[in-house]
Image (cartoon, rainbow, N blue to C red):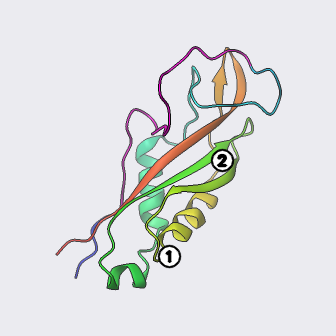
């Protein structure tokens, strides 16, 4: 059984789960305020293609998941702070079989990002990304 290349897919620049509608974001009221949509969204160093390459290079398809033919997407959520650091890494929707923990491990290993900006000021942004696991025959 061959393992297909793990792909990270995006809908717009990021998948924002639970977002009913986009509203105008105002300047933060406090230093800890977290936004879901800002004028300049955070960016992984080198962009989306570089992030896909980073995840594909670093993620391991766990044996238990392989043996059980587990495929699908793990949705990982995190807050990217004003310094470009990732915090509060959580699984929004997982697959189990060790794949959820593997996604958290790889996201924790990511380098600093370029932070998001709102009206020229760096702000905290909540991001959700899907990581796809697929097997080929």
Number of other residues with Cα within 10 Å of mark 1, as a class: few under 14, some 14 to 19, many 20 or more: some
- Where is mark 2, residue-wise? 112
In depth, the one of 51 and 38 nearer the eye is 38
Of tags 1 and 2, the one toward the viewer is 1
Nearest the camera: 30 or 108?
30
Q: Residue 52 in magenta?
A: no
Which secondary structure is most common in the magenta stretch? loop
Residue at (83%, 25%) from the top-left corner? 30
Question: In the image, residue 57 lies at what x, y percent?
Answer: 44, 65
Local SS, label 1: loop
Which is nearer the N-term, disc 1 or disc 2? 1
Q: Residue furthest right?
A: 30
Residue assigned mark 1:
98
- Residue 111 place in picture, x, y as percent: 63, 52
Q: Quadrant of residue 43?
A: top right
The C terminus lies in quadrant: bottom left
Q: Secondary structure at mark 2?
A: loop
Residue 17 part of the magenta segment: yes
Give the percent coordinates (x, y) of residue 66.
34, 80
Instruction: Specify the quadrant that holds the N terminus.
Output: bottom left
Answer yes or no: do the residues labelled 1 and 2 have beta carbons within 8 Å? Answer: no
Give the quarter of the image for residue 106.
Answer: bottom right
Horizontal and vertical percent for residue 102?
53, 70
Task: Give left or right: position of 57 versus 119.
Answer: left
**Magenta segment boundaries in residue numbering:** 6-27
State the residue at coordinates (47%, 68%): 59
């Amino acid at each position: 059984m061959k393992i297909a290349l793990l792909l990270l897919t995006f809908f717009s620049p990021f998948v924002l789960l639970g977002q009913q509608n986009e509203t105008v974001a105002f300047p933060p009221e406090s230093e800890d305020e977290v936004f879901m949509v800002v004028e300049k969204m955070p960016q992984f160093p080198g962009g989306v293609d570089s992030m896909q390459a980073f995840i594909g290079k670093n993620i391991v398809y766990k044996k238990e998941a392989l043996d059980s033919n587990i495929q699908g997407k793990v949705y990982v959520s995190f807050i990217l702070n004003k310094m470009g650091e990732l915090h509060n890494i959580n699984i929004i929707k997982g697959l189990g079989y060790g794949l959820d923990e593997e996604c958290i491990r790889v996201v924790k290993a990511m380098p600093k990002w370029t932070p998001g900006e709102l009206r020229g000021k760096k702000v905290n942004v909540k991001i959700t990304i899907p990581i796809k696991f697929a097997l080929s025959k």
